[in-house]
Image (cartoon, rainbow, N blue to C red):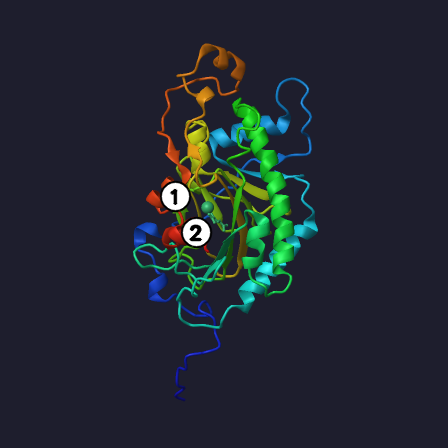
Amino acid sequence: MYTEMKEDKGARWFELECVPKEYIFPTEYRPQNLESPVCDSIPVISLANSKAENGHSQPVEEILKASQELGFFQVINHGIPEKTVTDAMNVLKEFFDMQVKDTTTETVPRKKGYIYTNSTDFAKDGVHLWRENFKHPCHPLEECIHLWPDTPTRYQEVIAAYIVEIQKLSTRILEMICEGLGLEQGYFKDTSEVQFLSSNFYPPCPDPSLTLGILPHVDPSLITILYQGGSTGLQVIKDGQWVNVGAIPNAFVVNIGNQLEIISNWKFKSAKHRVVTSTHETRRSIATFVNPSPNCIIEPAKNLVNELEPTLYKASQNLVNELEPALYKPSQYKEYVLHSNAFGDDTAAIQNGLR
Ligand code: OGA
Ligand code: NI
């Protein structure tokens, strides 16, 4: 019997039996060996045990080691209430579920205060990513919150509560990094206040060997704090190989952004990471970039480079004991963002605070 193929106008862009050609990456970008499970050996650090007896506390030592070796770690016992996190994940799920049932892949016109796109951003040579993304600034919270979506109705309240917790956690982690690197107390205080939320929805994909959720990249942040629930798909380069960042209940994934790599004079590494897709699993994530403020000058910290005066050198007592010449030139964060097109097509809008 002949049945006419009808385009399903009610279907969303990913509800398909095969991958449309706009989503198929050239061979060199495609993820290889998806069938063979890659190992998962990202350090998992408990923040509970933060009392120091001699020298640095255990979490400080562990964060320092992970940041030097891999640039990725997960934190547990971080003190963020589970409910704050599940509420945020649920409200974002509702937001993505509400988006227009649309078979095209155009970016929804940019609205004041936030950007939603179904798969066209950060594409490479015109090839689309297998994801939807939603992002907005979160700083200063009182000014941004009213520009965020008002449907779902609890969006603003729930995400603000989440961001307040993430701010506390990121401040704590940056203080530990400060201590570990031997930087003066409060080094990040003025430069690390700017949070930017970027939430992703990666639907199941008919053929993960052809597509990517996010291309390999490093984050243009100081640190990024990511919640990935129980989902897999995030991979990081370790010793030249892609390894999975395992799903650990209630953990946050923390990665070193390239701005902290500069400040640390390359003692810390900002590792390349990507997201691969799955035939059966939906991935949802909330990334919060903790960024320098736009006018801030980013450069290797003075007491990590050997132009240092001897007195400061002695006082620094850092664990990273080899001082080297500065490996990076000073650069204003906003200049860096513009020159490197750090947020892809949205860079200018984001730089201007989306207003
Ligand atoms: C990012 C990122 C990973 C993820 O937004 O920069 O790497 O799991 N996200 O969504
Ligand atoms: Ni990233």
- Residue toward you, 182 or 153: 153
Q: Is residue 209 visible?
A: yes
Residue position marked by numbered label 1 in the rendering: 337
Q: Please name the amino acid that badge 2 sits on.
A: Ile
Instruction: Please provide percent x and percent y for residue 206.
Output: 44, 64
Q: Is residue 317 visible?
A: no
Q: Residue at x 55, y 25 (%)?
A: 180
- Residue toward you, 201 or 194: 194
Q: Please name the amino acid that badge 1 sits on.
A: Val
Does residue 232 sit above or below 119 in this rendering? above
Residue position marked by numbered label 2 in the rendering: 350
Instruction: Please provide percent x and percent y for residue 20.
Output: 36, 67
Does residue 213 sit above or below 301 in this rendering? below
Q: Image quarter for residue 87? A: bottom right
Q: Residue at x 47, y 30 (%)?
A: 69
Disc 1 Cβ-to-ligand 1 distance below 8 Å? no
Instruction: Please provide percent x and percent y for residue 155.
Output: 61, 60
Q: Residues within 10 Å of mark 1 (few under 14, many from 20)?
A: some
Q: Residues within 10 Å of mark 2 (few under 14, many from 20)?
A: many
| Marks 2 and 1 close (CB-CB < 8 Å) | yes
Q: For the residues marked 2 and 1, what is the alpha-carbon distance in whole angstroms?
A: 10 Å
* In-image side of 208 versus 226 (left or right): left
Instruction: Please provide percent x and percent y for residue 320.
Output: 49, 21
Q: Circle 2 — which element?
A: helix
Disc ID at residue 187: none
Classify the position of the N terminus by image quarter: bottom left
* In-image side of 251 versus 310 (left or right): right
* In-image side of 289 versus 207 (left or right): right
Pointer 2 or 1: first along the chain? 1
How many numbered markers are drawn? 2
Q: Residue furthest bottom?
A: 1
Q: Circle 1 — which element?
A: helix
